[in-house]
């Protein structure tokens, strides 16, 4: 890849020269895995030294395989412990990990970091039938001080607790640490989490391939995610030109391992969207930051009548309306050659009068149109009608491809 792009490692003289290195995509990794099974050509350690094998689910293509050596696993634990300590986690804490212990790297990274700190860990997991109601009972018993999972599951857990007659504040969480999806840095979602738990909100995350993935991690001062540049060197690049973006602008994070030896990646394209800044933080860290976290993906964005629409923008509108539960779906369709956006959202109470329903619907449509710059239709659903998730929420249904004729 480097040779084809006209790059030679001898050209790398300063940190600024990193931008000359060609970007590697997930598709490049998948092709390499086919040609060089099972780990690809960037495996830089002997098989005898590999301690763990992880990977992706392969839902969008061939699964990627992640090999981690014993030395790297120790470094990953140290890196995650640093970020978790910066979030306020201490040896006296009990960490409730409410995300899957399977291929998903997030759970394992949180676990090894918390263990390195010396905190007590409750690797509860997620995804099994009935597990959310079980989580309510366990949180009542154990009273963990730290929650780790996705924002959508934390809100679902709070909703389930109230159905069981339990105030989620009784769990005693002091810190809620999130990754896996946008939400914790979205203003209205963040406020909903604070209202439910009265806890400090910490956003974190990058990609499994870039483990230690917590190299984007916030602190207790709520200034967004710090880019821990001494673990993983991060640049934001223009999604079209791939030129490095100036601070204060939006781009795609591109990551370079600085400590991994078993399967390092150089300039890996994340596909995420964020805005970065170089402002000082009260915590004293001088890293650049993502003040709004990772708020979308290039491939999650949908274009409706020429406007780019992100699920995070719709979420911010929905959660800002007090008479809605915050759960939503986006349906993009095509009517008579015209794109249409319909947002499904749940009302708080199924006993609302028809007059109130119409008022809420009009408010939602007005706020959506004002925020997105296009007309949006709203359909209101009863509480609980939209399916909840114990892990990453799927928000967008694009029906336009399904509506194409065979001749299109």
Image (cartoon, grey):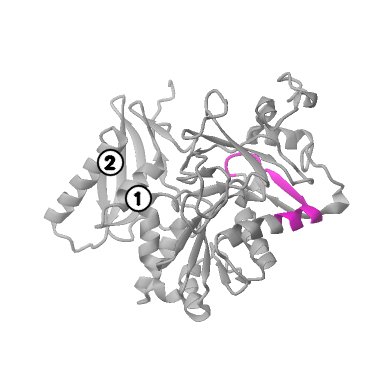
Q: Sequence order check: which comes first, mark 2 or mark 1?
A: 1
| Residue at image location 74% in from the left, 34% down from the top | 32
| Residue at image location 71% in from the left, 20% down from the top | 5
Q: In which quarter of the image is residue 362?
A: top left
Q: Where is residue 205 in the image (x, y as percent from the top left)?
A: 56, 50
Local packing at callout 1 (Cα closer than 10 Å; few below 14, some 14-19, many 20+) is many
Numbered disc in front, either 2 or 1: 2
- Above or below residue 353? Residue 134 is below
Distance from disc 2 to disc 1, alpha carbons, whole Å, reads 13 Å
- Above or below residue 393? Residue 239 is above
The answer to whether 394 appears left or right of 385 in the picture is: right
Q: Is residue 48 magenta?
A: no
SS for tag 1?
Answer: strand
Q: Quadrant of the N terminus?
A: top right
Q: Does the magenta stretch include residue 60?
A: yes
| Residue at image location 44% in from the left, 66% down from the top | 199
Which residue position holds label 2? Answer: 368
Q: Quadrant of the C terminus?
A: top left
Q: Where is residue 263 in the image (x, y as percent from the top left)?
A: 76, 43
Decide if residue 109 is in sight here. no
- Above or below residue 207? Residue 154 is below
- Above or below residue 45? Residue 254 is above
What range is drawn magenta here? 59-76
SS for tag 2?
Answer: helix
Q: Looking at this view, is 224 or 211 the one in front? A: 224
Q: Position of residue 208 (x, y in %)?
A: 64, 48
Which residue position holds label 1? Answer: 328
The answer to whether 304 appears left or right of 290 in the picture is: left
């Amino acid at each position: 890849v480097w040779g084809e792009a006209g790059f030679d490692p001898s050209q790398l003289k300063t940190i600024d020269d990193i931008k000359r290195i060609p970007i590697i995509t997930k598709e490049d990794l998948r092709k390499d895995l086919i040609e060089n099974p099972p780990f690809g050509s960037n495996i830089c350690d002997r098989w005898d030294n590999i301690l763990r094998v992880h990977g992706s689910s392969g839902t969008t293509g061939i699964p990627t395989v992640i090999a981690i050596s014993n030395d790297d696993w120790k470094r990953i634990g140290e890196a995650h412990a640093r970020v978790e300590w910066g979030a306020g986690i201490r040896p006296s804490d009990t960490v409730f990990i409410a995300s899957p212990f399977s291929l998903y790297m997030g759970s394992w990274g949180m676990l090894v970091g918390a263990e390195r700190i010396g905190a007590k860990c409750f690797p509860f997991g997620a995804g099994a039938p009935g597990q959310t109601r079980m989580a309510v009972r366990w949180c009542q018993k154990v009273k963990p001080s730290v929650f780790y999972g996705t924002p959508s599951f934390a809100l679902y857990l709070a909703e389930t607790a109230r159905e069981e007659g339990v105030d989620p504040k009784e769990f005693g969480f002091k810190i809620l640490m999130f990754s896996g999806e946008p939400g914790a840095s979205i203003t209205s979602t963040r406020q909903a989490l604070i209202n439910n738990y009265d806890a400090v909100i910490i956003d974190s995350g990058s990609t499994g391939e870039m483990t230690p993935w917590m190299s984007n991690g916030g602190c207790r001062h709520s200034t967004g995610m710090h880019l821990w540049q001494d673990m993983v060197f991060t640049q934001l690049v223009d999604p079209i030109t791939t030129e490095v973006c100036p601070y204060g602008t939006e781009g795609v994070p591109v990551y370079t391992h600085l400590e991994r030896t078993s399967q390092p990646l150089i300039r890996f394209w994340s596909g995420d969207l964020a805005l970065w800044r170089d402002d000082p933080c009260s915590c004293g860290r001088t890293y650049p930051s993502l003040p709004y976290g990772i708020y979308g993906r290039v491939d999650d964005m949908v274009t409706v009548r020429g406007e780019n629409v992100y699920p995070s923008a719709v979420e911010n509108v929905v959660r800002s309306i007090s008479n809605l539960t915050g759960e939503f779906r986006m349906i993009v369709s095509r009517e008579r050659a015209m794109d249409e956006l319909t947002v499904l959202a749940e009302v708080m109470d199924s006993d609302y009068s028809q007059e109130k329903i119409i008022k809420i619907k009009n408010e939602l449509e007005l706020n959506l149109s004002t925020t997105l710059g296009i007309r949006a239709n709203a359909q209101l659903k009863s509480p609980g009608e939209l399916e909840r998730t114990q892990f990453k929420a799927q928000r967008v249904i694009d029906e336009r491809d399904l509506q194409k004729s065979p001749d299109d």
